[in-house]
Image: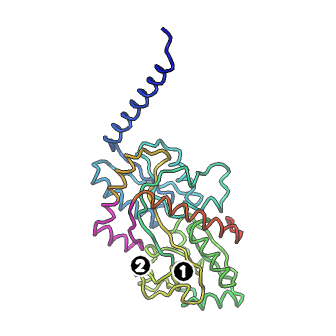
Amino acid sequence: MKPTRRHAIAAAISMAAACASGLAWAADGYPAKQITLVVAYPAGGDTDALARLFAEKLSARVGQTVLVDNRPGASGIIGSAYVSKAAPDGYTLLLAPSTFSIAQLVLKTNGSGYDVLNGFTPIVQTGSQPLFLVAGGNSGLSTLKDAVAAAKGGKSLSYASPGSGSPMHILGEMFARASGVSLAHVPYKGVAPAINDVLGGHVPVTFVTLGPVAPYLAGGKLRPLAVASAQRSPLAPNVPTLAEQGYKDVEVTAWNGLWGPRNLPPEIVKTLNGHFNEILKMPEIVSRMAVLGTTPVGGDADVLGKTNAADYARFGKVIKELGIQAD
């Protein structure tokens, strides 16, 4: 007896139901082994510090090891692309800063990159971070006015960033346009090496999040000149905004978020999102994130997806207008 169209449809429905049942079963048993949390930057930066903080708390909640795996290079593109190609089973995740959204708009990937808008599954936006302009203690620059005057006076003024295509790089070029000065961009492979060269006097200033430089600000080894947010940051209320000092519409806020590969099952997204929303409410996490210059965000997975899409659109336009390219 030949199978009829009705039989074929019934078989297909049965198979789909079996697959869905198997997926639900896999999600119910998640996680059953070690989770790898990829950071696409070297150890020592704020993204790495946050990842290790979250990994410890997530491990305690799920009863499995959460290993932080640093895969630096190309302003985060290498590590992010690695996760995009991983199996969508919840065992390979990415904690990424907002460079994730814009790096590929500045760097040429030669086909080795990732799809910013469709290549990943958003899980949760973990935090937001104001960006600061900071000068080296031996740079001779005490105020933003000093820095602009030095640049306009013919002195070569360069700024360090954690990589081409980072929010810090975009902010530097936006500020150069607003102030009418020429700034030379010096990209590094992460926050830590950029700060080290500013501390060493090799580069006079850097655009950076607060956490990695806070200890040096307290000791006078670095000086804060401005913050690039709409209002002063409660984390550093004495630092004036760029707008206060005459440079309006130069606002860039960094963020970080947890991603999985594309097609991560909704049940796993819900599980991880729930754990992280609880982690982000822990008093010790809130206080530790403040030390790292980060304010917890949380919320549904869509919060991260919409933030990513908004940055991609906004900064894509800025990058095109200013002709920003990798140095």
* Element marked by disc 1: strand
Among numbered discs 2 and 1, the one appearing first in the sequence: 1
For the point 50% across and 87% down, which residue is it?
240
Residue 102 vs 291, above or below: the answer is above
| Closer-to-camera residue (5/274) | 5
Asked whether, in this view, residue 215 is left or right of residue 41, the answer is left
The residues bearing labels 2 and 1 have C-alpha atoms spaced at a distance of 15 Å
Q: Which residues are magenta?
A: 277-299
Residue 35 drawn at (x, y percent)? 38, 48
Q: Which residue is mark 2?
A: 215
Can I make out residue 317 in this image? Answer: yes
Asked whether, in this view, residue 138 is left or right of residue 55, the answer is right
Identity of the amino acid at label 2? Pro
Identity of the amino acid at label 1? Leu
Residue 325 drawn at (x, y percent)? 69, 65
Categorize mark 1 by other alpha carbons within 10 Å: few (<14), some (14-19), many (20+).
many
> Extreme top residue here?
1
Q: How is the image coloured?
A: rainbow
Residue 324 vs 198, above or below: the answer is above
* Element marked by disc 2: helix
Picture quadrant where residue 300 is located: bottom left
For the point 39% across and 50% down, which residue is it?
269
Categorize mark 2 by other alpha carbons within 10 Å: few (<14), some (14-19), many (20+).
few
- Residue 61 - label: none
| Closer-to-camera residue (270/213) | 270
- Residue 133 - label: 1
Quadrant (top left/top right/bottom left/bottom right) for the C terminus? bottom right
